[in-house]
Image (cartoon, rainbow, N blue to C red):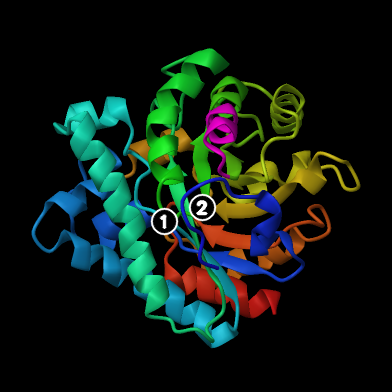
């Protein structure tokens, strides 16, 4: 799938079909713990400013593309731009012009990798990754939907003028911020996915139940998101709140779970990477099928790498 800049239609996203699609895993934890790279503020995009940084990102993505080819599955690749928004860029010393250029370069890197797969390869979908304005584990930067739309439009508008097929807001902690991202994407004419994170009780860091968050975002945006996801939580943290046969669970099409069962607070304090067990995680993804009948987008978050995605792909097939 090769999109060009300008308005796009979410109906053209191939991951909305019945076939499973993979994603990559925990990019920041892989780069830090496996590759020994320093990522201030967990900002993987900062590697694009360093000698050898682009090559490090290529080496990260290549094993996932190989897994997708081997399994004959499409893959959604997220740009390494979870922190590439104005507040975080300011902390890293990047001005507005540099920030826009780094977001564009992140898309261009994935374009290059997609082109290398050849015309007969399974589809590679490029998603412009948008992260929370705040921490990601706590709601430390509460915003209205209007404030969130204005803040995230800086990054969303940049992606809309690239070959990104969609934007995905990863690790959203509140409905208000998610509504703002959807509205920014609607204004820019680009499909958008919202991925919430939850605590061990299945509630968002804001305290809102997952069901209420999904329903609220849909109600306030005219069901503007192409679909929803859950990320940065272990399946056991949210499986019990999923209601089989409910309209809201049909809106959840993707899961990017942590390999670890630890809470967000425990992960924050951890000095060693908890990689969990790839085969056990794959079995837990299979168990989600009954509760999430629309689930087709399968990936990972903290502690996962290409081994976990390979295990999930093998089990799903």
Q: Residue at x 24, y 38 (%)?
A: 99
* Residue 271 seen: no
Relative side of 316 to 54, left or right: right
**Vertical position of residue 97 compared to residue 56: above or below:** above
> To which residue does mark 1 refer?
26
Write the start and end of the magenta stretch as one range: 181-190
| Dominant SS in magenta | helix
Q: Which residue is mark 2?
A: 258
Q: Is residue 23 above or below residue 210?
A: below
Residue 158 occupies which quadrant of the picture? top left
Q: Nearer the viewer, residue 34 or 76?
A: 76
Write down the quadrant of residue 189 in the picture: top right
Whole-percent x, y for residue 226 in the image: 68, 45
Q: Quadrant of the N terminus?
A: bottom right
| CB-based contact (under 8 Å), mark 1 and mark 2 | yes
User: How many dots with numbers?
Assistant: 2
In this rendering, is residue 241 above or below 36? above
Give me the residue at 77% from left, 29% from top: 215
Give the residue drawn at x 63%, y 46%: 229
């Amino acid at each position: 799938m090769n999109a060009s800049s300008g308005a796009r239609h979410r109906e053209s996203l191939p991951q909305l079909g019945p076939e499973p699609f993979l994603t990559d895993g925990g990019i920041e934890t892989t780069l830090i713990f496996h590759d020994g790279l320093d990522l201030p503020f967990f900002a993987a995009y900062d590697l694009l400013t360093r000698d050898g940084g682009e090559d490090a990102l290529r080496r990260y993505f290549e094993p996932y593309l190989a897994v997708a080819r081997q399994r004959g599955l499409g893959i959604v690749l997220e740009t390494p731009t979870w922190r590439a928004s104005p507040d975080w860029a300011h902390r890293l010393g990047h001005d507005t012009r540099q920030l826009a250029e780094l977001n564009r370069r992140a898309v261009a890197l994935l374009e290059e990798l997609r082109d290398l797969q050849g015309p007969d390869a399974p589809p590679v979908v490029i998603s412009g990754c948008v992260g929370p304005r705040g921490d990601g584990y706590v709601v430390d930067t509460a915003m209205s939907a209007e404030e969130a739309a204005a803040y995230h439009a800086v990054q969303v508008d940049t992606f809309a003028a690239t070959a990104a097929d969609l934007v995905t807001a990863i690790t959203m902690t509140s409905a208000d911020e998610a509504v703002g991202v959807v509205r920014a994407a609607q204004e820019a004419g680009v499909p958008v996915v919202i991925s919430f994170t939850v605590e061990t009780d299945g509630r968002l860091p804001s305290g809102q139940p997952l069901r209420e968050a999904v329903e609220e975002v849909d109600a306030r945006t005219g069901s503007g998101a192409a679909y929803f996801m859950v990320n940065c939580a272990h399946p056991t943290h949210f499986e019990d709140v999923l209601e089989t046969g409910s309209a809201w669970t049909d809106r959840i099409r993707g899961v990017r779970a942590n390999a670890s069962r630890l809470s967000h607070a425990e992960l924050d304090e951890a000095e060693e990477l908890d990689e969990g067990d790839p085969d056990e995680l794959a079995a837990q993804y299979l168990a989600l099928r009954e509760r999430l009948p629309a689930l087709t987008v399968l990936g990972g978050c903290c502690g996962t790498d290409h081994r976990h995605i390979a295990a999930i792909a093998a089990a799903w097939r």
